Image (spheres, rainbow, N blue to C red):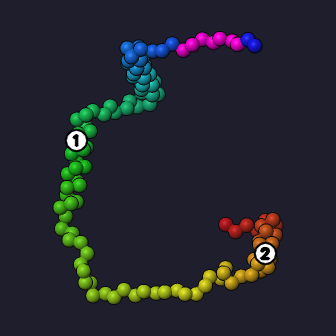
Amino acid sequence: MTSIIGKRKRRRTEGESQVEGAAAEQDAAALQELLRKHFEAKFEPLEVKTKAADAFIFRAVEAEIQEEEASDWTGLSEDDGEEVEIIVHDAKHQADTVTGSELRAFMVRSCAIYRLGFHIH
C-alpha cells in the first residue's frame, strides 16, 4: 500500500500574523478609498463624517432625552373614578362542535371551488 505524502502546512510565527493583519487593514483602507472615488465620480460626493459631527449629534440626542425625562407628566393617578368592566366568554367555538364528516365535506367543497378558479382575495 502506497501512501502519498502531501505538503505540510507551515506554522506561522506571531510576527508574521501581525504583519499580515496590518497589510490586510491597509488593503481594506485602499479598497475603500478606491470605491469612494469611483462612487463620487458617478454620483455626488459623500459627506465625510467627522468625530466633531458625531459628538454634536450625540450631545443633541442626549439633551433631548434629558428634556423628555424632565417633563411635567406625573404618570397615571390611582383612582380615576372609572370602573373596569370584565366580560367573560364561556361559549365553545364552532370548530369544537363540528363533526369529522362535516369538516371533510367543507374541505371538499372548498377545494372544488378553488380548482374552479373562484379565489377569495
The image's mark for residue 10 is none
Q: Classify mark 2: helix, strand or loop.
A: helix
Residue 93 in view here: yes
Q: Give the residue at x 26% y 84%.
A: 80
Please state the horizontal and vertical placement of residue 12, each as a whole percent of the image: 45, 15
Q: Which of 13 and 39 is in front in this view?
A: 13
Q: Quadrant of residue 78?
A: bottom left
Q: Give the range drawn in magenta.
A: 3-9
Specify the principal SS of the magenta part. loop
Examine the rendered structure and indicate whether residue 92 appears above or below residue 112.
below
Please state the horizontal and vertical placement of residue 103, each as a whole percent of the image: 75, 77
Q: Earlier in the sequence, mark 1 or mark 2?
A: 1
Residue 34 in view here: no
Q: Which amino acid type corresponds to the residue marked 1 in the rendered image? A: Phe
Residue on which the image places disc 1? 56
Q: Give the residue at x 45% y 28%.
A: 39
What quarter of the picture does the C terminus occupy? Answer: bottom right
State how far apart marks 1 and 2 are (Cα). 67 Å
Graded by Cα atoms within 10 Å as few (under 14), some (14 to 19) or many (20 or more), the crowding at tag 2 reads few
Q: Which amino acid type corresponds to the residue marked 2 in the rendered image? A: Arg
Q: Give the residue at x 82% y 67%.
A: 116
* Side (left or right) of 89 relative to 101: left
Graded by Cα atoms within 10 Å as few (under 14), some (14 to 19) or many (20 or more), the crowding at tag 1 reads few
